[in-house]
């Protein structure tokens, strides 16, 4: 997994993993052991599952938005690369070249 400099995104990634595991465990237990449809426990389980799905969707949206803003394009065809925004990547490259003690090019 990639380390995140934004602690909010890192938190969402951890929550996403935890909530997916919990949802899987709940759904597996529900189908393995079975529950009576009219029981109060079934209603509570359904609420918990709905809440977990809502939390998972929220974390996925936050992470997707962050990735959309910060990641480089994964495609390498000329059309995709020419349509992308590269301004912030140029600034990063310029900043790295200005660091004292770093070897210069040329």
Image (cartoon, rainbow, N blue to C red):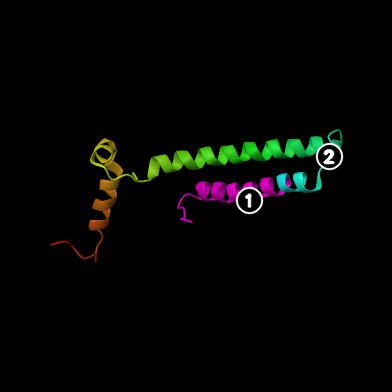
**Residue 36 appears left or right of 105:** right
**Span of residues in magenta:** 1-26
For marks 2 and 1, the one nearer the N-term is 1
Q: Secondary structure at mark 1?
A: helix
**Residue 1 appears left or right of 33:** left
Query: What secondary structure is the magenta-colored segment mainly?
Result: helix
Mark 2 crowdedness (10 Å alpha carbons): few <14, some 14-19, many ≥20 = few
* Residue closer to the observer: 83 or 96: 83
As displayed, is residue 103 above or below residue 58?
below
Q: Residue at x 38, y 45 (%)?
A: 71
Mark 1 crowdedness (10 Å alpha carbons): few <14, some 14-19, many ≥20 = few
**Residue 6 appears left or right of 85:** right
Residue 102 position, x and y percent, is 24, 64
Q: Which residue is mark 2?
A: 41
Residue 53 position, x and y percent, is 64, 38
Q: Residue at x 63, y 36 (%)?
A: 54
Residue 38 position, x and y percent, is 86, 33
Q: Quadrant of the C terminus?
A: bottom left
Residue 98 appears in view: no
Q: Residue at x 27, y 47 (%)?
A: 91
* Residue closer to the observer: 10 or 54: 54
Q: Residue at x 24, y 51 (%)?
A: 94
Residue 59 position, x and y percent, is 56, 41
């Amino acid at each position: 997994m990639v380390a995140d400099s934004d602690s909010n995104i890192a938190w969402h990634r951890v929550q996403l993993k935890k909530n997916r595991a919990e949802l899987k465990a709940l759904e597996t237990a529900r189908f393995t052991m079975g529950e009576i449809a009219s029981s109060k426990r079934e209603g509570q389980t359904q609420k918990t599952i709905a809440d977990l799905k809502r939390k998972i969707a929220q974390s996925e949206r936050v992470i997707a938005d962050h990735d959309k803003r910060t990641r480089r394009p994964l495609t390498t065809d000329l059309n995709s690369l020419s349509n992308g925004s590269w301004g912030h990547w140029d600034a990063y490259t310029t900043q790295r070249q200005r660091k004292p003690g770093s070897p210069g090019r040329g």
